Amino acid sequence: MTEMLLSVKNASVSYGKVEAVREVSLDVAPGEIVTIVGANGAGKTTLLNSIMGILPFRGQVQIDGCRFERLDIEDRVAAGLFLVPEHRELFTSMTVADNLVLGGFRTSRSSATAALQRVYAMFPRLKERRLQLAGTLSGGEQQMLAMGRALMGEPKLLMLDEPSLGLAPRIVADIFTIIGDLRAAGIAVLLVEQNAQAALRIADRAYVMELGSFVLGGAASKIAGDPRVVASYLGFEQGMSHQETAS
């Protein structure tokens, strides 16, 4: 049996009296891509933020078998857990290169230098734009920079919150290709994504979230073929397109 890199048990998150996430459990194995799909307001971002330690929650979180729900964000980062937030949170008045260097501040100089070369190899456009201010980049380039900055910290698990949001279809395809490359490099990914078709195509396993709870879970290929998912998140034509691609 594969030992899970991330294990979340019975996580619940409340905003005052409103329970945004209710008794959610999930696992991510090393080198695995797991996606959470669902509509706006389902609780997906809240769940990621609670795992990262940004929001308080009830439940258990383990990484590499060690519980860390009481640890602060810095300790979670040190354990190999990184979040690329929905709005990217770049230092817009700093250059691309400086944003990347900041991402590797916890690592040694030699490790950061090697990581920077890997990031530039994965995102050639960032190397071309390395002296450009982050705030002047296109939306797709900013998403690449946000991912690259997280990769500078040498994560074991990268959590991505809506990486395709607001991007053109061609750029979305590039981003998802890169996510697949992360799996090949041995980096696990927990992906929150409204573009269910793209997310289910690339993921190993998937969870469907509605109103703060998981209503379905299993192999991504099986979830993609579920009539409820096709009707609610893919649409008939999109669902047929995904199945044809997977066959």
Image: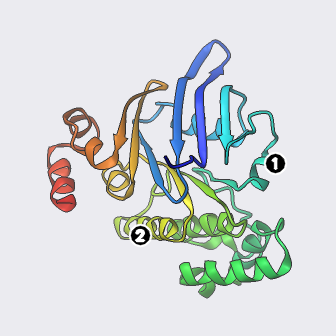
User: Residue 201, image x and y in percent?
Assistant: 32, 56
Looking at marks 2 and 1 on the same chain, the residue that comes earlier in the sequence is marked by 1
User: Residue 112, image x and y in percent?
Assistant: 77, 77
Residue drawn at x 61%, y 51% is 85
Q: Secondary structure at mark 1?
A: helix
User: Residue 132, image x and y in percent?
Assistant: 68, 80
Mark 1 is surrounded, within 10 Å at the Cα level, by few (under 14), some (14 to 19) or many (20 or more) other residues, namely: some
User: Residue 147, image x and y in percent?
Assistant: 60, 65
Q: Give the residue at mark 2.
A: 177
Quadrant showing the C terminus: bottom left
Which quarter of the picture shows residue 125? bottom right
Residue drawn at x 69%, y 61% is 90
Which quarter of the picture shows residue 177? bottom left
Count of numbered circles in the view:
2
Q: Is residue 160 left or right of residue 73?
A: left
Q: Residue furthest bottom?
A: 128
Q: Is residue 245 left or right of residue 116?
A: left
Q: Amino acid at mark 1?
A: Asp
Distance between the alpha carbons at the discs numbered 2 and 1:
30 Å
Residue in the foreground of this view, choosing between 3 and 48: 3
